Amino acid sequence: MKPLNRLLWGTALTLLVGLAQPGWAQLARSGSQVLTDEPTGTAQDLKGLQKQSTDSSLLLNDNSNQSLEQLLQRKVEKAQIFVRSPIEAIDQRTYGLVTAAHLRDGELMQTQLVRIYRPEKAVNDDLITNQSTEYVWGLNNDIELTLDLQGANGSVPGVQGPYVVQRRFGINNGNIFQDITALGKFRLGDLLGGKSSVVVGLTFSRPSFTFTGLPGTNLPTIGRPQDAIQLIPSLELPITYKAYDDRYAFTISPRLAYFPGESAIYTPVNPGVSTRFGLTAGIGFGGAFRISPRFQIRGDATFILAGYNTVDRNSGLPTKKLVYNAGLRYLVNPRLAIDIFASNAYANSGAPSFTAIDSYTAIGVGLTFTQDRLLYFLDLPVNRQFADTFEPGVPPEVRRLYIPASFDLLDGSTVSQGTNQVRLVASTGTFAAAFRAGTLNDFEAGFYGDFAPAGPDESDGGLSTKIRFLHQPSGDPFTLSGVFTIGRTSSRACNFINGTRNGLEQAINGQPTLCPPVPGQTPAGDRGPIPPNLIGLATENIGELFVISLSFPTQYTLPAGHSLWVNPKVVYLQRGGDRSPLIGASFGGSLRVFPGLDLIAQVTPVFRGENAFVGDSLAQLMPWQAGVRFAPGLGGLSFDLFATNALGLSPYQSLRVRADNAVSVGLGLQLGF
């Protein structure tokens, strides 16, 4: 072939590639991966690839007997093709509104969500929350099933007219999940130019309430128990539209719910009020806009057209109120997203999502992910069709690398996908343990317990979630994670709140203390770091308080294996008064003596809050730890030997110092499997 003809053929074929493949550069950009909306393993339409290729291997030469189509198909076959995940989709449900979009056959998506309202005076709890764990599963391409475990803590709704109203009866707090919502969504097809579905919901609830007169009213305490499970139905007809190259989605949804009796699940009418709830009709509007591949703006609002969806906080009478949710979604990777939003809703699915809290706005945090396995034994192969990174050029074995840090239970980077890590630590008079499970390379969940030594200090235990935002081995400048924990203290927290070593003893003896009592419960002694009511299965004792922590471990590793880190921490202690929040930051580093042996040291200055008993009063001291770590090279096995004055190794106890600045010696074992 003459040089001129070869040039013309090459130019023509390059133009054909550009016309037939409007986004081929995405393949070059994404390494070995291509995103598509078709299932993995099926024939791919070449028009799904997007930009012109600059790969000269696509040009035919004198020895080629392959067509352009065959060359392009060979290029595609070399690529690992992923399906776009429902988390990336712009038309999936918003915080309080179901859209007409469906998960595909076999896909499963899980969302953990909590709304936190500002503390309210005259209420036993100073923490008003709604929490939810939601599972959405595509039964097939036309039917989607949802199970949403919802609830609110016992302090809601709070002050209503002359009463303080709590969603509890007797001594039952029910702090986690009291309401179960099941939804079935069925595809209807095109309607009014958009996609439409019908959503049928049923909520199972047992709302019981206690009305206590405000000080000075002399009103008697009235209990309103609910002996049988209530069934609260709902019906929705979402119609969803997409526009601007699928960057924008909008949903309009007529909605119905029926609230039987004297409450809208979370908000009861006051004693003596004859008005009841019943049928509530509204219309919901929701939308989402994709700012970039990682950021979306999302929100929804439901206008109540008929009936009631809340109770007026001043009068105690049923009323109607706009329900809204609005926020920002950040995609850590295509299978993991974080939402931060504002809301006045009590819940997010079915009839509970109709209910609004009067006068307050909550800050909500959500975590949505598509895992490979559910509850460690149910395999979800369809979810493996989704890419797990926006940086496909980084080898999977690099993304899985775990980076250790201090001796604290939850330090270091995230545990890799499909890997579990157990940490056991015995120290002078104490014991601590943590279990961490890698759901994705950027996401882990687990639980921990930290027993305090005998004396005035309290234990704590709870649940942990950790998300990795940056990973130095994958090319980021350093490793950055976010750690969220929610747990409970043991009863000896009364000593800390009261500021005296005998605060719990005083409370048990009926003496006035700063440690709030539990309604209907006789004070009892300390029963350890993990009270059985952590997940709402039993009642709480005095001093067993929610403790919530947020920390951001940030670490830089030098080429020789040495590391430096800083870990800012904020801890909120329920009913803690002036003792809460505790704010501090850990500064530390490790020195690699030789492969497998590191010297480790860390100090944690506290910027707010007294954190240690010195004599019979509280003072602010600096926690520290120092020791050695030996890793023999057998998988994730390592051994720690260290000394510390910190009360414990959980995020909360790492900010506390043992009474009288006592020093303990600890021996730790870490095992990965």
Image (cartoon, rainbow, N blue to C red):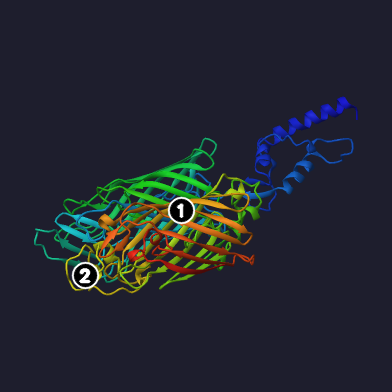
The picture places residue 618, in percent across and down from the top left corner, at: 28, 60
Foreground pick, 512 / 393 = 512
The reply to whether residue 419 is visible in this rendering is yes
Residue type at mark 1?
Answer: Leu
Foreground pick, 392 / 670 = 670
Residue extending furthest toward the right: 1
In what element is the residue under mark 1?
Answer: strand
Q: Quadrant of residue 580?
A: bottom left
Q: Residue 507 carries which label?
A: 2
Q: In this view, does 149 lie to the left or right of 66?
A: left
Quarter occupied by the C terminus: bottom right
User: Alpha-carbon distance for marks 1 and 2?
Assistant: 39 Å
Q: In this view, does 543 lie to the left or right of 534?
A: left
Q: Mark 1 sits on what residue?
A: 367
Foreground pick, 44 / 589 = 589
Q: Which mark is residue 434?
A: none
The reply to whether residue 137 is visible in this rendering is no
The picture places residue 13, in percent across and down from the top left corner, at: 78, 32
Lower position in the chain sequence, tag 1 or tag 2:
1
Q: In which quarter of the image is residue 182?
A: bottom left
Q: How crowded is mark 2: few (under 14 residues within 10 Å), some or many (20 or more)?
A: many
In what element is the residue under mark 2?
Answer: helix
Residue type at mark 2?
Answer: Ala
644 relative to 474, above or below: below
Residue extending furthest toward the top: 4
Q: Is residue 564 left or right of residue 656?
A: right
493 relative to 264, above or below: below
Residue beneath the point at 18% across and 53% down: 317
311 relative to 174, above or below: above
Quarter occupied by the N terminus: top right
Residue beneath the point at 71% across and 33% down: 18
The picture places residue 423, in percent across and down from the top left corner, at: 51, 67
